[in-house]
Structures are given as structure tokens and as C-alpha cells.
Amino acid sequence: MSVFTYKQRNNITLISIVVLGCLLFYALTDIFSAILGAIVLYTIFRPLYLYLVEGRSWNRSLVAVIIILISVIVIVIPFLTLSFMMINKISSLNRNTFPIEEWLGKLDHFAGSNFKQPHFADSIMLKVGTLATDLFPSILGSAASFIISLLVMYFLMYFMFVQMREFEAGLLRYAPFREQHAMKFAVALRNATYSNVLGQGIISVVQGILLANGFWLVGIPDPVFWGVIGAFISFLPIVGAPTLCIPAAVILMIDGHTLKGVLLLAYGLLFIGNVDNVLRMIINKRLANTHPIISIIGVFIGIPLFGILGLVFGPVLLSYFLLLVEIYETNTLAAERLERIKTGPDI
């Protein structure tokens, strides 16, 4: 006969689960981005999977493989291509591709004579270099780790799709809240994912294209490169691609092209900025409305954890956390109401 009571055995089992869970979580920190990526892609492609499997009666394994191939072609390959292009361009800035030294010298002279900041350009370039290093750590220093994470992500996503009903039933069974709250959380999670990934992705691509077009019209070298830079920083709702037009316009004015500088500044701040607002309004009506504060804080959380993927994963992770807090608050209020009903009205 056990020396422990039934309640003691349950408490010991719970403590063991918590300790082992913490150890497992710590062991999986290196592939946490792969797990989060699998969840994001599963949420995005779930309607397509249901349509092909349940609507068109396609084979589940075949559809899962097709979705994986689509995500590789549409997301992974373009992302890697653009990332490597940016790295190559950043590493070759000291060559003759851009008259960087000439621009920086003129900018230092302008800032020194007008704002008493003679080393303004040097400090900006130092901060840009630090940011670039933070954004691309996985690609610059750990290609093998990136490939492993990619394989783990698709391995998880394959079985999440093939065993979709079992997977979702297990989530409902072990969810720490009631079924209706779990369904509400699933819908909110889907909307947050669509808003942060699809919505912000569309806005970023459009802003990058418009920025590249504006730079090409005024004759700035390699507008495609700057368009890609603008697309990446468009994930920052306050910064955005239009802010790149400000230093570019200043450089044009310093170089003697005042009209081009003024036109580029107006094009960036008035046209690209308003296009951003219009697209964001349309997307927020069709999807979820992600507050800019969530995007900004999420980016600062995500970049140290995931590198450049943190531009997407950071806001998504913060949105998931806030959804859990909302569910917890709802459960707490429901429990308090139930307790008041049981005990009767206060006298």
C-alpha cells in the first residue's frame, strides 16, 4: 500500500509534470521558432486543406505535401533570396555600387553646419550595422541551424495536417478553459495570425514596391534593393517604408537636386503613407485589428529571439499572449459569478 494519500499522489504527479515540462521547454528553445512557424503556417493554410480534403475528397497526405511545397515556393524561397540579396548588398556598400562615402561626407557637413552634429552620419551607420547584425544572425552565422529548424517546422506541420482532427481534439481536451472559450480563442488566434502575417505582409510588399518605384523615378541607384529594405522595415508601423524617403530626399537636396528631393519627400510621406493607412483600414475590416503598439513591442521582443523572423513572430507571439490573458480574465469573471450564484446574494 502506498504511503501517500490520493491527494498527495495527485500533487506529486502535478509537480512532476510541471518540472518535466519546464525541462522539455528549455530543451526545445532552439527549435521554438520552428514550432511557432508550424502553428502560423497551419493556421494560414488550414482553410485550403479543408477545402481540398473535405470539399474535393483529395488524399490527406498528398494535400499536406502540396501545401508544404506551396509554402516553400511562395514564402521560404523568396524570403531566403531577398535576405541573401540584402546581405550581399550590405557587405558591398564599401564598393562603388553606391557613392556612400560621398553621401556620408555631405550629410556630415550639412548636419555639422546646421545642427552642430558633425558626426551624425557615422552614428547612424553604426546603428544601422548593429540592427543588420541583429536581424540576420541565423543566416549570417548558423545556416545549418536554420535548415534544421525548417525541417522540424515542416515535419510538425505535415502531421498537424494529416492528423488534423486528432490534433484539434487533443487541443480542446487539454485546453485549460471551457470549450466555448477554447473555440473563441481559436478564432481570435486565427484572426491575429492573419492580421500580423498576411495583412502586414501585403502592406509591406506594396510599400516596398512603391518605394522602389519612387527611388527609380528620381534616379537613386539600385531601387530594388531599397525597396526590399523598405518592405522589411514596413513591419514597423510607425517607422515604415516612407521614412526611407527622408534621408534619400536630404541626400538629393545636398547633392543639388532640390526639386527631386522635395518630390520624393512628398511622394513618400503623402502618397506611400496614405496608401499604408488605406490598406491597413481595409485589412482591419476584413481581418483582425492589430494595434500598432502590439506590433512595435512585438518586434522588439521578436528580433532578439528569432532574428529577422521576429518581425513576424514577435507581434504574433505577443497577440497570442494577450489572447490568453483575455481568456483567463473571462474565466475568472465566470468563476466569480458562479460562486456568487452558489452562495446566494450578499446580505
Image (cartoon, helix red, strand yellow):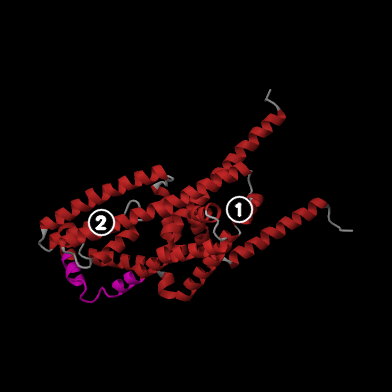
Magenta segment boundaries in residue numbering? 84-106
User: Upstream in the sequence, badge 1 or badge 2?
Assistant: 1
Left or right of residue 26: residue 86: left
Closer to the camera, 241 or 3?
241
Kindly tell me whether residue 116 is visible in this rendering: no
Q: Which residue is mark 2?
A: 210
- The residue drawn where x is 44% and y is 66% is 72
Q: What is the x, y in percent for residue 174?
A: 66, 52
- The residue drawn where x is 57% and y is 60% is 60
Question: Given the current orientation, which residue lies at the most extreme right position?
Answer: 1
Q: How many marks?
A: 2
Quadrant location of the N terminus in the rendered image? bottom right
Disc 1 residue type (three-letter) = Glu
Q: Which residue is mark 1?
A: 168
Q: Residues within 10 Å of mark 1 (few under 14, many from 20)?
A: few
Q: What is the x, y in percent for residue 23?
A: 63, 65
Q: What is the x, y in percent for residue 75?
A: 41, 63
